[in-house]
Structures are given as structure tokens and as C-alpha cells.
Image: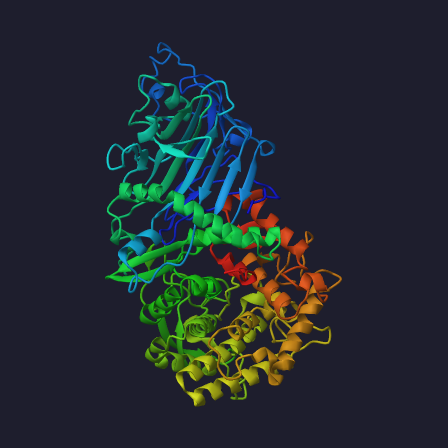
Amino acid sequence: MQVPAFHGNVSFNAHHSPMGAFFTFTCGNFGTRGGLGLEAPRPGNQDIYIGVKDGDRYSAHPMKCLPFYEGADKNAQPILPDMAPENFVPEMSTEAPKKKRSEVLAYTAAQLQRYYAWATDRWVTPEYEFAIYTPFDSIPDPQSATSNQMRAALIPAVTAELVVDNRKGTQTKTGFFALRFSDPGVRLIDSGLSKGRVGFAFRDDMGVAAELVEVKTDGTRLGSDETGVYPFTFMRWAPNEGLADADNPSHMLGSCPGIGFEVPAGKMYVLRLAFGCFVNRIVTTRIEGRYFYTRYFASLTDVLNEALAYIRFAKVDCNTLNDKLLISNLNPDQQFLLAHATRSYYGATQLLDVAGQPYWVVNEGEYCMLNTLDLSVDHVFWENRFNPWLLKNLLENFVRYYSYHDQVKDPKTGELKPGGISFCHDQGIFNNFSPLGRSSYELTNLKGCFSHMTQEQLCNWSIIAASYMAYNNDTEWLLQNKHIIEACAQSMLNRSIGPDGKPTGIMTLDSSRCGNGWEITTYDSLDESLGQARNNLYLAVKCWATYLGLYRLFKQAGNNTGAEQMLQAARLNANNIAAAMRPEGFLPAVFEKDNHGYHSRILPAIEALSYAIYWSAAPNKVDGSDWLALAEFKPLVEALKKHTVTLLSDKEKRNHFADGGLKLSSTSKNTWASKVAIFEHVARELYNLDENGATRTAAAATGVGGWEKSDAAHTKWQVEGKSAYWACSDQIIEGVAMGSKYYPRIVTTMLWFKGL
């Protein structure tokens, strides 16, 4: 199918990443740097020069580039750095012959089009095209896959093509791709690449390789060994300098390596490019790991050669993925949000080899925290579809390294009582695993951001386990972890004892790890409406889902007594939540009447219903698993619907921004794209509501319609203004990405998609 041109602002960065390599080629935002990034919390720091000029490589015609370099939006010329020759010999610089260099010009938005699909990102100018290919699929389980299968899945590289069609031209054109680095260490690759290929690298860690292909009028493609025409390399301090110098096109002091090719009139050439990395050393501390792909590749040039050999298959895979998204019932904004999120998710992934065993890590965007568990639970919808074995890997590593036991404390008296098992917020930061049983994030004696998330993470581990089992029925794993599941159930019960000593089903007690502070939820940057964990509506409904998830696990393990205990806790929880309905028709964000959050209205009240929806559609059924249809939970389900309708239909629009985007809390300007996606899914899928709280029309109800204004606003949040630099971002304040940038979590949009 034909990918349509992107319908919004095209000046935005996108991750382009392989799976499990924590590596990216990021580009797209006009006037800023990007390029290669390895284990980085932000886009790369290279000026990217992609383009053509009329004439041969030595001509003085302007170089017409995509605007992916600093100053491109102002047509600024490359400034020679301190290492340039003029700065070595300042007294002689006036005597040195001045060589005429091409002017570097950038296209404007009006002069180009961007075709942004699920697995391709293509830029079209009047003179050439540039396309990047990022296919994705399941990562095979190395315990059952062959080495060839693992090698194909884990190529730590992405590919691209620069197409110059000069068949109607009357003079030669010169195409080029160059990166101008800010850090020293760049070199031309002079060995290891297959015949006809050239490239450059940053030390031994990452690099670019290319080969040249001629496209005949009948579509036949001929390589350099057949045409005798090869790409060439250059490396000076600016791309126009390297192209123009016939005597010394390369200088090891240079910081701007590039690859060029001349296209005679009447010819069409394609420069195939591979952007890859290879880090062959231990990359993490405490829990020492190296990249799993190093089992299957021997060097950076091995990676680059394989990527170029694979490009024709990658293009087929990309087109297949693109078609699946295009024929889905998602509107253009929803398609964009899913495609954009997919790229930033894979850009954050690492598959490590720890003592011979795989260890899966998803880094938390710009913060680079390892396996933040409250993100992992949101990734479950993606990973369970593509890589369920990685969910199991995550669960086991949290139990093995990052679980703990605590006590709970009475919020008024401070009295300590039995607590139980829970799990850390994360496993470390910036490739440094934290002390076992401790996260990099959580601190004691705090009443807000950076406090502990004990209840939330207990729910998250349990929900991930229930989701894994619902779709995989791994009885062996379940029985091996039976004692952990039993411990989770008891820990849940111990945290929900009310002032009268009776269970409530709702978290009422904070962890002893908080000291004189109190627990928070994943919504750490919002106000009390979503920040405080104790007696919080959002977390209460999540506890309800957790009880039912544990019920599923007990049932699958044959423990009917444990299952009934969890069902009873869910009943208590549901009744207490439904009873909290306010006369105005909404549930308070915090059940404590003297808390500011009591007056807040929160959309994530229904977030955890997504798990009940998800499990009810699972192939592995258990008795009574369609809880949303059970009469005993009807009061809760109806109360949450009434709450949602009240918030969406509010005439004061307290849960909408002016642009139509959704606002998670009526009392906070901070909203999260990942959570908005879950809310939208539940409101639409379960309650058949549109963005204004009305029942969707028959036409809208056949798909995912009724949210067009919100979806359009959510797209603008990602691609306009300051947000555009950061690829996909989560925390949005009044339309601008202010936190959780370069972020993987927005793959919650996968909930909308039913085509795989």
C-alpha cells in the first residue's frame, strides 16, 4: 500500500533502532543535531548532511541537504572547529590558497515531504529520496532458536537508502552522506568491509558503511562489481571541504567523515547505508553483562556487512508492517502515535548476556533507569504479543535480584505491622545495576517524588505475571513460582487493613521503607490526586485488578482456596470504591476527605480496567474470568463509567486542555501520553464512549473513532515546538514535552491495534 505523506509538522526527531542494542540513528528535527547514539539519553550530537549537488564532487554548486544539522533552519554554513588547519597555522592562513567550497543549503518544510510509517521513514525532495528502514519482529528465545535465527534478529544496525534519479538530467549529480562529530575518535574504515563497500566509524563502537547500486530502467539492480562504479569516502572538517579537495580528501584530524557518489546524466543510483554498533566488552556494573549480539557477531564490520546484505529483506519486512498499520481501523493520528512509540521503545532496549543467560532491559528514556517496573507493566501489551519469553525473564530477574520484604506502618501512630514481599521501582541507572534489593530511584523519609512505590510495584509484578500466564499458560513457570505468588497475595492483604483492623481491599498502610514519609504511585510528578498511594482511587482500582490477576494465577495453579481469598478481597475493594461516589457524579482521587486530592477528578480511575479487558480476551480462560460482566462487580464498573462520563462531559472541561487533548487530573497541568492511551482504550472499548463522554455513533463504534480531536492534539504534542527534538515523549505540560522524553512507554498505544 502507498504510505501517505505525514499530515502534520514534519520537523520532528524519530528513533531508528534495532532490537536489543540500545543504539539509534535519530534524525528529523530541523536545525538540530542527531545521528548515531549509543546508550544515550538524548539524540546523537552529530550534524547530519544528506543531499546532492549539481556537477561532480569538485564542483562549486551548492550542496542541497536535508535540514538535519545545527543552523540548517537558518541556512548557516559549517563553522570550522578548533582542529581545522587554519587554527594550527594562524600566521600562514592568509597565505594559503583559498579553495572555493560549495555553499551548504537546507531544504525548507515546503520543499520536502515526509512519509512516516510503522517501519519506514522516507523523505522526498525534488532531487532525491532518503529512506530509513527499521523492521521489527519477535526476538527468538535463545534456548530454542538457532544461531542463524538469533543473528538475523539481533543485528545491531538499521539500514537506509539515498536515491538519486538522474535519468532525466543533463549533467552529473553528486550524492553524499556525512556526519560531523563533536567528539574525537572518528576514522575511515579501511579493512573488514566486503568488496565495493566503504565506511567510517567512531572508534570501534559504531559506524556507517555503504555500497552503491545502479537501478536500470527495467528495475534491475547492479552492484559496483558489475558497473565498475564505486562510492568514495572523505573526511575533513566540513562536508563541502571533504568533497572539494582533490589532493587531500581525507585527513585523520578531520571530524566530518562522509560517503559520496557521482551519478552521470541518464543514470539512477542508490547508496545503501548501514548504521551499526558493536560493543564487545562488559557494559554493566554489579550484575556484569555484555550485549547478547556479541555471541553472533565478531566485529563492527561484521555487523555492517550483514546489515547491507540483509537490506533487501528488511525492506520487504518493513512494507509488510506498514501495510498492517495502514489497513487497520486506526485514524492517521492514532497510526502515527503507534509508529512513533514503537521506534522509541526499541531505541531503549538492551538484551544482555549475564553469565551465559539472557537478561532483558528496557531503559527509561532520558533517565536511563533500568527496567522501571511501573513502565514494564505498561509494556506488557507489546511484549506479550511479540516476546513473551522476555516477560518471564523480567519477572524472574526481579524476584532474583530486586525483590524485598518489609513491614507496614500505621499512618497515624507509626505502629509497624507485618508487610510482605514487594519489588523495587527499578534495577539501576545508566548501565549501573543498583545494590540488590534496592532501586536507583527510591529514598526514605519523603512525601512525594522519589519516595517508595511498594504497593504499586507489588501490583505491577503480579499483573505482569497474570498477563504472561493468561496468554502463554506456562505451567512449569507457574509452579516454580507458586511460593512467590502466594507471598504476593499475602502482601496485598497485609497492606489493606483499615483502622478497625478489618481488611478493606484498598491500600491503607505505607511501607516501613518510607520512614516518616509515605508511598507514592507511578504518577510521581503529579499532585496528590495521583501522587499519593494510600487511599488513592487509581491505585485502589489497580489493587482490584491485582486481586483478580492473582485469582487467575491461583486457579491456574489449582489453588482454589487462594483464589477464593483473592476474590473476596476484590469484592471488598469494589464495594468500598463504589461507595465513595460523590454527589457530583465522580469518585474522589483520594478517599481521605481532608486531602487536597479529595476534590480532584482523575481519568486514570479506569486505567486498571484495561487488565480485566485484556485477560477476558486471553486464550487461557479460568472460571469467572470475565469479571467485567459479573453481577457482583457491576456496581464498580457502573460507578467508574459514571465517573468517566462526568469527567469527559464536564462543561468546564477540567479534564481537557484547550486543544482538546486529555488531562489526567483536573488539578494538574501534567499529563502522560502513555496513560492517556490506556484511558482512551478503556473508555472506548468497555464503555463505548467518545471524547466528550457521549455514546459513540454507530460508525465510530465499528472502529476506534470518536476521539479525533484528542488524537490530533496528542500528535501535535509529539511533533511541534520543543517536543519535536525528543522523538517520543510521555510527560506533557500544556502541549510541551517537559519530562520523560526520548521515552519507551507510549507503546501502550498497542492496545488500540488488533491487526497482528
Residue 686: % across, % down: 62, 70
Q: Is residue 290 above or below residue 541?
A: above
- Front residue of 533/720: it is 720
- Looking at this view, name the residue that lies furthest to the front: 218
Residue nearest the viewer, comparing 665 with 101? 101
Residue farthest toward the right in the current orientation of the protein: 651
Query: Foreground: 750 or 354?
Result: 750
The vertical placement of 39 against 584, above or below, is above
Q: Position of residue 322 (x, y in %)?
A: 51, 50
Res 82 quadrant in image: top left
**Residue 599 coordinates in the image, percent (x, y):** 66, 69
Q: Is residue 268 above or below residue 293?
A: above
- Residue at x-position 49% and y-position 34%: 129
Residue at left 61%, top 33%? Answer: 110
Check the image and name the residue furthest to the bottom.
Answer: 561
Pick whichever, 550 or 89, lies toward us.
550
Q: Is residue 87 left or right of residue 296?
A: right
Q: Position of residue 724 (x, y in %)?
A: 54, 44
How many labels, in total?
A: 0
Identify the coloring.
Answer: rainbow
Query: Where 28 sits versus 747, above or below?
Result: above
Is residue 279 at least partly visible in the picture? Answer: yes
